[in-house]
Image: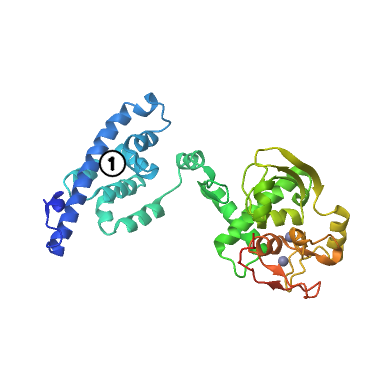
Amino acid sequence: MFSTATTELPLLEASTDALELALGGTQADIDRARAAQLVLIAELDRRQTNTGDGYRTMGEWVAARLDETPECAKALVQTARTITPPIRTALEGGDIGYARAVETTRLHMSGVDDALEIGWAHDIAGLRRRVAAQHRLTPVDEIDSYENRYLAMQPNLDETSWRLWGQLPGYDGRIISKALSERGDQLRTEGTTLGQRSADALTTIAMDSLDNANGECSTSTLVTVFVDAQDAAPSNGRKGVKIDGGPRIGSRILEAILCDTTIETIATTTTGQLIDHGAHRTLPPEIRRTVLQRDSSTCVIDSCTSTYRPEVHHIRPRSQGGDHHPDGLATLCWWHHHIAIHGLGMTIDPSSPPQRRRLLAADRAEPPD
Ligand SMILES: [Zn+2]
Ligand SMILES: [Zn+2]
């Protein structure tokens, strides 16, 4: 047996066959060590060690003690509990590897008597498919899939972006997947990836939910903007502007807020001294209603027929002196307003007809300081 002798081989001079043999030897070492772990875990499990140490399950205890992934720890515990004597003998004798022992044990537990023989016909991935096909969801599995459900969200350091991940029971996952896909298709399909559509869909579903909870449209939601005047003024709002709750925002988001929201501004000096404050609707509600009425609450971008969450946009940005005259305002669907214009930085061609607006590509150049 080569064992872990790879480190002693003159690596560059060794033949490929010798390296392959050595690699196989290291795997045999790992398999033997896993076999030993199965014996130890079975005994620790019998002693209910996890309960004594305050862990809900043996899997969690193993994950913590071995610094292993939850999946790996769960497989160790389940295999330790259910491995049959023939499979154990095959693993300890080096006839099968650890991964094969895990899957063969699963196949046996799913009701296949001669799992070891049947297993030989498949590679590990094939074995897994065979187990999945055999698998009937037991009440315990079902409860497990609910108990392990979670959804996590984490912002990056300055909250300019968030990561989401989690695990859902099968049926719930299907519901969410279907809802996101249906909403995503309503918003916009050309030029967006499936992932981008799902992200937009989730955001708008959340906005709908907030609207329903507050009994008002989010376009009139109060946003508090904190402005550090000494930082914000010389940088055109690219520094020194924050919204309530912490996230730093750039000039684009600030423009979106100024476009169609009710804001409360709190301007301070760098030392925190209050120099100005006030709440005001960025767009008077009667003008907003007039524009929506004029455009039949439908997006005015050429060939867009969306009526989803219509918002009123200032064609000439507020920061460049755009006022609230209806001629300078356009009804846009959520996607065109929030994503295309304020997100991707496109602008409306002012010379395009009012009911058939064209978009101009984003100017990616930084505005002068
Ligand atoms: Zn706008
Ligand atoms: Zn649109």
Q: Position of residue 85 (x, y in %)?
A: 23, 41
Residue at 68 percent across and 72 percent down: it is 360
Vertical side of 237 occupied by 56: above or below: above
Quadrant in which ligand 2 is drawn: bottom right
Residue at 15 percent across and 53 percent down: it is 6
Task: Give the quadrant of the C terminus.
Answer: bottom right
The reply, left or right, for residue 146 in relation to residue 180 is left
Residue at 71 percent across and 57 percent down: it is 255
The reply, left or right, for residue 288 in relation to residue 272 is right
Query: Which image quadrant is residue 204 in?
Result: bottom right
Q: Position of residue 251 (x, y in %)?
A: 66, 56
Query: Which image quadrant is residue 50 in?
Result: top left
Local secondary structure at mark 1:
loop
Vertical side of 236 occupied by 169: above or below: above
State whether residue 316 appears in this view. Answer: yes
Name the colour scheme.
rainbow
Q: Residue furthest top?
A: 52
Residue at 29 percent across and 58 percent down: it is 123
Q: Position of residue 208 (x, y in %)?
A: 71, 50
State whether residue 204 appears in this view. Answer: no
- Give the residue type at disc 1: Ile
Q: Which residue is mark 1?
A: 83
The reply, left or right, for residue 294 in relation to residue 152 is right
